[in-house]
């Protein structure tokens, strides 16, 4: 095997999200989020499960930070729950909420781990959804206010800020096909939400800079499309460039307007919005799990999840192995994606999520030997190295996820963690993948 060594300063970390791990849903003044409402609605999640307790991280923060330190993590990407900071989404700050994240950041710094907060990982205060949610401009404007509040308290100790996580999911899974909270199926609302999420990013970036933030970014989940040229171009426009181009170039692609004209004339894009969105960012976060395959078929109907996709149909090569999510495994997709972003947009990147779901639990000896996840991580970390060798400026890698957690609509059925969580006892157990990852960090590289 060959040892692949990463550049000096390359960061190794893990990532989580507030609603997936924190629990304490009704404690210390936290208000309800759209995921509280959605997960408590019959039929929306696996077996009706919710994140009310999750991994009880809110009460086990010191234990979990010590666990991170034992792995040798350079950095930790967590998300701040907007309903903990402003239970109603606006108005006065909840002292207990901001104090919690203040303490978390202190614990991370004391452990030698660079804190990287994400301001929004899908848990919108329910009060905003009651007034229309992300399709409404007010939500973006108030997000800028919220960003200023959090930055005012934490900016002096934070390494890198992430404004939003995967706005594609918030817009198109939340308002397009309804698979995610708030569960709406309205194509026009999905397109409005996409624009207002872009605007929210721009306003938050300005607020963070004003508060002294050194590094600001956004974590996207771009599709790496495979297939015939026409289908790939359409999918890239609708799923990727709807975020890439306004954020990095200050414009929307003309084809986006053309393909979605049956739904909207985009008159909700106001004068000055693109200038607000096109703020300098220090790097682009890339969440990658698998590529996707498409072919052009003029008779294919529009997908409910993606407005404008008429004529495109997806398929999956049967020969590829899949994870427990049914997602095909192809590490070269990550290399191609990182190199494409470098060539087309010239922005440094960081892999902000990458991992795999497998059901492996403790054996008779209590060990969790998740060899499939080890293989997945090894091959994808090597794929990042390949991208660097091809010229991409990649600054770090954060594995998804630190621990098993509430996997959104899949409840607790899918396990992505490198740390096993017994949900009945909340016992944490390092999996083989955690031990493997600790060695990667110690070696600052991986064998292939």
Image (tube, helix red, strand yellow):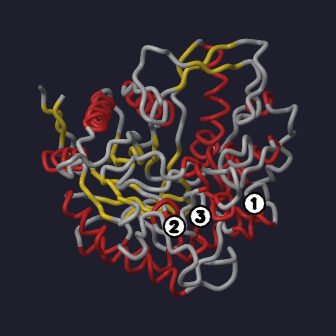
Q: Nearer the viewer, mark 1 or mark 3?
A: 1
Contact between marks 2 and 3 (CB within 8 A): the answer is no
Q: Earlier in the sequence, mark 2 or mark 1?
A: 1
The numbered dot on residue 278 is none
The residue beneath circle 1 is: 133
Q: Nearer the viewer, mark 2 or mark 3?
A: 3
SS for tag 2? helix
- Would you say 283 lies left or right of 300 here? left
The numbered dot on residue 204 is 3
Q: Is residue 298 above or below residue 410?
A: above
Which quadrant of the figure has residue 191? Answer: top right
The residue beneath circle 2 is: 209
SS for tag 3? helix
Residue 249 or residue 377, whichever sits in front: 377
SS for tag 1? loop
Crowdedness near tag 1: few (<14), some (14–19) or many (≥20) residues, C-alpha within 10 Å: many
Q: Residue at x 74, y 42 (%)?
A: 176
Q: Is residue 78 above or below residue 192?
A: below
Q: Nearer the viewer, mark 2 or mark 1?
A: 1
Q: Earlier in the sequence, mark 2 or mark 3?
A: 3
């Amino acid at each position: 095997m060959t040892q692949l060594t990463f550049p000096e300063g390359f960061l190794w970390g893990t990532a989580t999200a507030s609603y997936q791990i924190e629990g304490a849903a009704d404690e210390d003044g936290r208000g309800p989020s759209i995921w509280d409402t959605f997960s408590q609605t019959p039929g929306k999640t696996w077996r009706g499960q919710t994140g009310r307790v999750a991994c009880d991280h809110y009460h086990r923060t010191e234990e979990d930070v010590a666990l991170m330190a034992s792995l040798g993590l350079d950095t930790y990407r967590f998300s701040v729950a907007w309903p903990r900071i402003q239970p109603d989404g606006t108005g006065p700050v909840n002292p207990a909420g901001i104090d919690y994240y203040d303490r978390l950041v202190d614990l991370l710094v004391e452990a030698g781990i660079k804190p990287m907060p994400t301001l929004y990982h899908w848990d919108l205060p329910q009060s905003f959804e009651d007034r229309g949610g992300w399709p409404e401009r007010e939500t973006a404007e108030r997000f800028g206010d919220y960003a200023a509040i959090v930055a005012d308290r934490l900016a002096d100790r934070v390494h890198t800020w992430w404004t939003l996580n995967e706005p594609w999911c918030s817009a198109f899974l939340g308002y397009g096909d309804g698979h995610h909270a708030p569960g709406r199926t309205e194509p026009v609302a999905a397109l409005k939400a996409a624009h207002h999420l872009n605007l929210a990013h721009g306003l938050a970036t300005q607020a963070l800079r004003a508060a002294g933030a050194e590094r600001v970014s956004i974590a996207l989940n771009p599709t790496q499309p495979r297939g015939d040229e026409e289908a790939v171009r359409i999918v890239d426009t609708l799923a990727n460039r709807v975020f890439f181009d306004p954020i990095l170039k200050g414009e929307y692609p003309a084809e986006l307007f053309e393909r979605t004209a049956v739904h909207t004339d985009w008159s909700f894009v106001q004068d000055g919005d693109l200038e607000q969105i096109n703020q300098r960012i220090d790097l682009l976060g890339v969440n990658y799990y698998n590529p996707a395959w498409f072919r052009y078929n003029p008779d294919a109907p529009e997908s409910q999840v993606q407005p404008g996709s008429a004529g495109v149909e997806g398929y999956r090569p049967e020969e590829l192995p899949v994870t427990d999510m049914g997602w095909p495994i192809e590490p070269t997709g990550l290399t191609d994606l990182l190199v494409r972003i470098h060539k087309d947009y010239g922005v440094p990147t960081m892999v902000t999520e990458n991992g795999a779901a497998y059901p492996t639990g403790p054996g008779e000896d209590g060990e969790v030997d998740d060899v499939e996840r080890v293989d997945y991580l090894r091959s994808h970390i090597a794929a990042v190295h390949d991208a660097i060798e091809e010229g991409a400026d990649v600054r770090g890698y954060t594995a998804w996820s630190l621990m098993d957690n509430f996997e959104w609509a899949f409840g607790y059925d899918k396990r992505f963690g490198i740390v096993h969580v017994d949900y009945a006892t909340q016992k944490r157990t390092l999996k083989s993948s955690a031990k493997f990852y600790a060695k990667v960090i110690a070696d600052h590289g991986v064998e292939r």
